[in-house]
Image: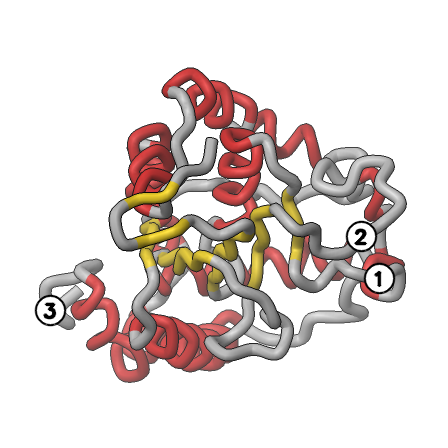
Amino acid sequence: MKKTTAGKTSMDKIVVVEFPKSGASWFVSMIGHALSIPIRDIYVQNEQYSSAFEIRKHPWYNSLEELGITKTCVIKSHELPGSALHPFEANYIHMLRDGRDVVVSKYFFEKDFCVNNGIISNFKFSLDEYVEKTAKEWATYVESWLEQNVLKCRYEELLSSPEEVTRALLAALGYSCSEQSVRDAVAANNKEAFKKSLDKAFVHNTFVRKGVSGDWANHFTEKNKNSFKSIAGDLLVRLGYETNNDW
């Protein structure tokens, strides 16, 4: 499964960092399945965090006694570079997604999923307010990781070619697994299967909402477009999501 490539040694831990709602939960589930290693959330290491839902019914923690980070595992994280929550050596993958889709996905995630599952008590933002707020946060986070020498994974590419993208990234990290292992990992974590695996952990399970690219166009008004352009339009162009700010 694990090997050493020329000039590079694969680590025991893989950390997939993302601005929330960029697809990392799906991706780490596929990596864990393909490599047959534990899957962890950097924030789930004690009972206090998980009191809002039944963490041991979550597929990553099913019936486990210990919630902590294991020696070998793949970890989902929303932390910035140099975080004290990453006090270990690891290979990093930065998960990227069109910031406009991130805004929409995160808006409905907090308004619906988080409120109805008791993770947050209320949600008071209008979409206009949320676009401006989240565009700033997304741009700051993404730019901080773009400055780091880490691998990148685009959510949109993973959607269109999950087997190829997963296999290529694991190979780049020095991991070798069979084509069948990757194929099985993708099949076991398609949208329907991934949602079903979370049903036991969350009473109101809308964690996997649409899982598509371009949904922002169904929700953004001209005001929302202009707000996003003024804050993070240049970053969209830099990342290749647009060729200019005329969208």
Nearest the viewer among 115 and 89 is: 89
Check contact, mark 3 vs mark 2: CB within 8 A. Answer: no
Label 2 crowd bin: few (<14), some (14–19), many (20+), radius 10 Å: some
Where residue 30 appears, as percent x and y from the top left, is 51, 35
Instruction: Answer with mark 2 or mark 1, whichever residue precedes in sequence.
Output: 1
Residue 100 drawn above or below residue 170? below
State the CA–CA distance, disc 2 to disc 1. Answer: 6 Å
| Disc ID at residue 67 | 2
Instruction: Answer with mark 3 or mark 1, whichever residue precedes in sequence.
Output: 1
- Residue at the (43%, 59%) spot, across then down: 92
Left-right relation of 214 to 184? left
Give the residue number, with chain letter if any, for mark 1: 46
- Residue at the (64%, 44%) spot, across then down: 39
Nearest the viewer among 199 and 3 is: 3
Residue 136 drawn above or below residue 186? below
Where residue 183 appears, as percent x and y from the top left, is 42, 20
**Amino acid residing under circle 1:** Asn
Where residue 7 appears, as percent x and y from the top left, is 27, 54
**Amino acid residing under circle 2:** Leu
- Residue at the (32%, 51%) spot, across then down: 154
